[in-house]
Image (cartoon, rainbow, N blue to C red):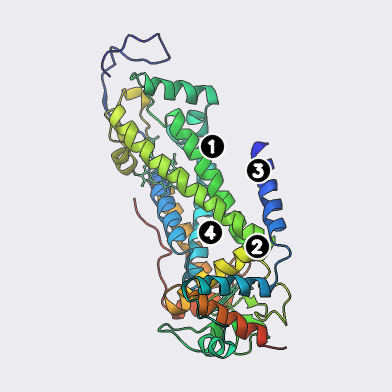
Amino acid sequence: METTAMNSQSTPAGGKPTHIRILVWDVPVRVFHWALAGSFITAFVTAESEAFRNVHVVSGYLMLALIVFRVVWGFVGTRHARFSDFVRGPGAVVNYVRSLINGNPEHHVGHNPAGALAIILLLLLGVGTVASGWMSFNEIGGDALGELHEGIATTMLAVVVVHVLGVIVSSFLHRENLLRSMLTGYKDGPREDGIGHRRGIIAIALVAVLGWFGWGLTQGQFPGLLDANAAAQQAHHGESGEHDDED
Amino acid sequence: MRIRILVLSTLLALSGAASALTPDDVKSALAAEVKATDPAFKDFSAQRGNVFFHARHGGEWSCATCHTELPAASGQHTVTKKPIRPLAPAANAERFTNQDKVDKWFKRNCNDVAKRACTAREKGDLLAYLMSVKP
Ligand code: HEM
């Protein structure tokens, strides 16, 4: 944000309109985000042991359920949660990255184009991980599918690392604490860019449905996803860790 | 498009790499590994492998917990209850024909049973035992 006499981009720099504290991320987006992070990490760290097989599988299914919700929310959610608000072409990503390098970062109240790319990749890789995991769990596709499952999951971890680094770097470049905004929902910006609703009820419904789904899985209510007597056995061992209720 | 080609070629490479390895090849590779550190090494012992297979190693499980006391029989995963095809090559021709798969499962299962990796000698003994099991 120092010397910027660059050729004009789409950057609305300069005399900013008065910035106030505005709500940007509704509650479902934030619950989704931290539950997704939690389920991904849980699935990742339980992958290496046969003892945690059921925890691994349950957290994978919860991750997929979260992504299904997010895709729906991407069409019917609040303004900055909508795909139409942040999914842009490769040109926008290139322009944005160039603006970072030029030291005159384009500002976006919602997701910036580079962040949006990581988000879309994470959603797709999440679906791919669970689909390939389900297939190898059911021995469809043989050893190759198991390898593919691991490959996609590792790729997803790499994108997560880039995503987190991106959040840190953007936070510094924009002098804006993005991590806090994903926790509280608030950013500073012009009044007209804020959203009007928190949608807390939807978030409660989301947590309730996921809780019911996760519990049902451990109780063998969905034998096509996780075997019934296996899950009962797991319950006797007193396994936990398939709940997500952070915000 | 690119990605589809990538995925397809990965699948092809993975399935192609699986061919033409025998349990004997796997065993000789392990023997070479042991010999590298112990020149006096002669051969693996099916007897020692038998003992290792059926014993517990500090944890709750032995190899036999999932692969049954008689590894020529079909086993069952003790957590997921999914069936596991026989581990002895005489009862299941697919066993020990894919080095990546062998390495992956030795690593996982030794960690689950013994909370550590198995040594090359232990793996060779286990393989010698499994190869001696007749259906
Ligand atoms: C561990 C796995 C993680 C996954 C799979 C993940 C995935 C995602 C996804 C899908 C979004 C889009 C949210 C939405 O619009 O619904 C997002 C946004 C975000 N994530 Fe993560 N995330 C992870 C970890 C983290 C961590 C550890 C942090 C903290 C540094 C973080 C900080 C953020 C922030 C600040 C945003 C909003 C970015 C923006 O302002 O455009 N994420 N993440």
Residue under the image location 30 percent in, 35 percent down: A186
**Residue A199 in sight:** no
| Amino acid type at image mark 3 | Leu
In this rendering, the answer to whether A199 lies above or below A115 is below
Pointer 2 chain: A
Q: Which mark is residue A61?
A: 4
Q: Which residue is mark 2?
A: A143
Q: Nearer the viewer, mark 4 or mark 1?
A: 4
Q: Nearer the viewer, mark 1 or mark 3?
A: 3
Q: Position of residue A46 (x, y in %)?
A: 45, 64
Q: Which residue is mark 1?
A: A75
Q: Which residue is mark 3?
A: B6
Residue under the image location 70 percent in, 71 percent down: B22
**Label 2 vs 1, first from the N-terminus:** 1
Instruction: Find out whether the residues at labels 1 and 3 contact each other: C-beta distance under 8 Å.
Output: no
Q: Which mark is residue A226?
A: none
In this rendering, the answer to whether B134 lies above or below A175 is below
Pointer 4 chain: A
Q: Are marks 1 and 3 on the same chain?
A: no
| Amino acid type at image mark 4 | Tyr
As measured in the structure, the alpha-carbon distance from the residue carrying label 1 to the one carrying label 3 is 31 Å
Q: Residues within 10 Å of mark 4 (few under 14, many from 20)?
A: many
Instruction: Find out whether the residues at labels 4 and 1 contact each other: C-beta distance under 8 Å.
Output: no
**Label 2 vs 4, first from the N-terminus:** 4
Q: Position of residue A109 (x, y in %)?
A: 37, 27
**Label 4 vs 1, first from the N-terminus:** 4
